Image (cartoon, rainbow, N blue to C red):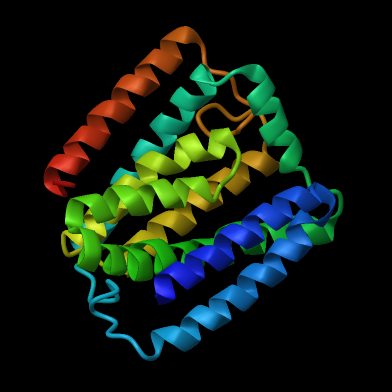
Amino acid sequence: MIACYALGVQLAASALLAWLGPDWLWRATLGAEAGFLTGLVFYLRRLDPYILGLKAVDWGEAVLVVLWLQAIAFASDAAILWLAPAALLDRYLQLFQPHSPAEWFALAALAVGVAPVIEEVLFRGLLLAALRYRLGTAAAIVASALLFSAIHLEWVQIAAALPVGLMLGAYVARGGSLYVTAAAHILGNGFSFLGLICPGLPWLSADWRPTDSEGALALLVAAGLLGKFLRRYPIA
């Protein structure tokens, strides 16, 4: 019930903020997400942290998983930039162009500090645990990944978030720590933000356009790394 309520609030907030448009997006999103995080922390005090994936970290495995996930993210993002229509990419870039230093700061705080923590607690913590109880592990991983990608609203972000959601959910469901997925999520969003403030960087910036050979290579690398990851942390 808590997970469904939290997801409903997140979806409603995302839809409202998308409708408000980029001029309001960063300030309003930052306030909404910060309040949402406060509410989640209040609820988490009543729950078993181990069930939510808040468990001790094996640092060797943690570093490996974070780097593995980031390598897949780089490759899959490059493949998406290669395959996506130019109109979708242009619309995506227009949404992420703050107009003042204050909005850039708000975007950084939201994307790198607040949103990854909220999304990991919600999707790989509360929601995954609730769905596993009702549906079983495999269906819970897939359903939580689909919902995680859906809240990103823009098609470019939805396509990028889906494989990430599958990997993070599979890792937590197979005994992984939510601390590791939060670290991986923060690092990935940090690289995405760096790509916004440093346009034109190959394999990093959202305005980079891979050649056919680069795009095909990225797609093969992403598929291979994702397959290997899901063999180690299987969905089924």
Work out whether 150 lies above or below 126. Answer: above
> Where's residue 155, x and y in %?
56, 34
Residue drawn at point x = 36 percent, y = 22 percent: 219
Residue drawn at point x = 66 percent, y = 53 percent: 15
Which quadrant is the N terminus positioned in?
bottom left
Work out whether 227 lies above or below 122. Answer: above
Left or right: 28, with 165 as reference point: right
Left or right: 235, with 142 as reference point: left
Q: Quadrant of residue 125?
A: bottom left
Q: Residue furthest top?
A: 212
Residue 141 visible: yes
Q: Quadrant of residue 177?
A: bottom left
Work out whether 76 lies above or below 166. Answer: above
Q: Quadrant of residue 94?
A: top right
Q: Residue furthest bottom?
A: 46
Residue drawn at point x = 51 percent, y = 18 percent: 82
> Where's residue 123, x and y in %?
40, 61
Residue 67 visible: no
> Where's residue 232, x and y in %?
13, 46
Residue drawn at point x = 23 percent, y = 71 percent: 57
> Where's residue 52, x and y in %?
29, 74
Work out whether 138 lies above or below 129. Answer: above
Q: How many marks?
A: 0
Q: Nearer the viewer, residue 7 or 33?
A: 7
Left or right: 61, with 204 as reference point: left
Q: Nearer the viewer, residue 13 or 225?
A: 13
